[in-house]
Structures are given as structure tokens and as C-alpha cells.
Image (tube, helix red, strand yellow):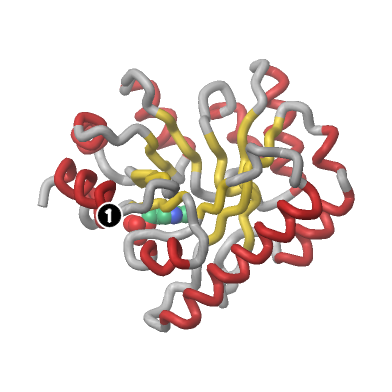
Amino acid sequence: MSVAQEIINLKAELPEQVALVAVSKYHPVSAIEEAYAAGQRIFGESLVQELRRKAEELHLEGLQWHFIGHLQTNKVKYIAPYIALIHSVDSEKLLLEINRQGEKCGRRIKCLLQLHVAQEENKYGFTEAECWEYLESGAWKSLEHVELCGVMCVATNTEDENLIRNDFHRASDFFRKAKECFFSGQESFSVCSWGMSDDYPLAIQEGSNMIRVGSKIFGARVY
Ligand SMILES: *Cc1c(COP(=O)(O)O)cnc(C)c1O
């Protein structure tokens, strides 16, 4: 199936409240243009260098870039002027740097807190305990150039649906409690980013309202 057809089918299938991030990493700008022509506006990238190259090349009205990969503090400055949402905030140090760069370019940068809920060591993110402790500290309230908009996670890479569901469920629980305790008056704290090509239906059942889908749309990635 073509990229355009995949986008159209996927959008028809998604509940109204679920946003689609088309993960275009490792795919050429021509594929992004094809998705854009089919109506897709949000694109996710996970490498700063690749994102910079694509953002310089593409100037499409209304296109939004989301950063979804592990972000090194020394690279924040390259994407700060235009990034629409950083999904992958996994440390206080990174958040401080995003705030610093947001100030430099006069922006308030939208961010999600990445939770490490997967049963795998090689994944990034705050543990729930760490993240809760950070929120409790209140330190984030003084970051005027950061806007915390929700939570992101990646589930365990497994065939076991129960395990995947459980990972999403924990993230969903965390979001709900954080909303209640720290962000009840903040409408913009509303994003639950989980679900990829292989697990997005489960993710939506477990409260996701933003899915990040790559290979289902664009085909296999060539590394
Ligand atoms: C690559 C990636 C995706 C998309 O994965 P697919 O399985 O190709 O849909 C989603 N989220 C993150 C964080 C990724 O790195």
C-alpha cells in the first residue's frame, strides 16, 4: 500500500481524540511529502542531525516536527527554535537545558515526560518514582520556557500482549495521578503519547491520545 493510503486508512480507524505522529526517521523527504499531501501534518524524528537536515529542506505550511528520540543536552540548541513537541524528556538536566534554549529563542517549548515502564534496561526515561519525586519538588514550576504537556512511554518489545498492556496501564495511571496532583488547573497537560506500529490498538485501549507510527506508514526502515 502507498504511504498516502496507509495514512488515510489509519486516520479513518483512529478515534477522534487520538493524534497521529508519523515517524519518518530514516525515510527520505519524498516520503514525508507524500504523507503531507495525504493530509498528515505531524512528523516524528529521533535523531537531531537527521531532523535538522529535513527541516532545512522542507518548508511545508503547517508541518509540525516532534522529537521522539533520546536527546542529548548539547543538541537541544539545534531544534529549540522550531520543535513543536519534545516527547522524550528523561532527566531534569535535559529539561533545564530546554528551558535555557527556549529562553534564548523566546519560546515556551512543549515537552512530555518520558517514563521508563518497559521490562528492558536499554530504554530511556524516568522511573515512575523518580518522575513523581521531580514533580513533587516543584522545581519545574520555575521553568518559564518549558511547558509540560503530558507523558510518553515505549512498551516492552515483546509478543506478550498482557505485558504491553501493563506497561501502558502504568503510564496511564501515572498521567492520571500527575494530572490530579500537579496539573489539575492546566488544560495543556493532556498528552498521553504511547503506541507504535505493532501496539497502537492496545495503546489506545489503555488511554493513549497520541500514537507514534513509523513502519506501518512508511515501510521498513533501512539503517
Ligand atoms: C521508531 C520509533 C517509533 C515508531 O516505531 P514503528 O514501530 O516503526 O511504528 C515510535 N516511537 C519511538 C520512540 C521510536 O523511536
Figure label count: 1
The type of residue carrying mark 1 is: Glu
Residue 29 shows up from this direction:
no
Location of the C terminus by quadrant is bottom left
Name above or below for residue 202 compared with residue 186: below
Residue drawn at x 62%, y 70% is 170
Q: What percent of the width, then of the height, locates residue 138?
A: 87, 45
Residue drawn at x 28%, y 47% is 11
Residue picked out by circle 1? 13
Q: What percent of the width, then of the height, locates residue 202?
A: 41, 69
Does any atom of ligand 1 lie closer than 8 Å to the CB of label 1? no
Nearer to us in this view, 2 or 149: 149
Residue 199 shows up from this direction:
yes
Residue drawn at x 57%, y 70% is 169
User: Can you tell me which quadrant of the image ligand 1 is in?
Assistant: bottom left
Task: Identify the element where label 1 is drawn.
Answer: helix
Nearer to us in this view, 214 or 57: 214
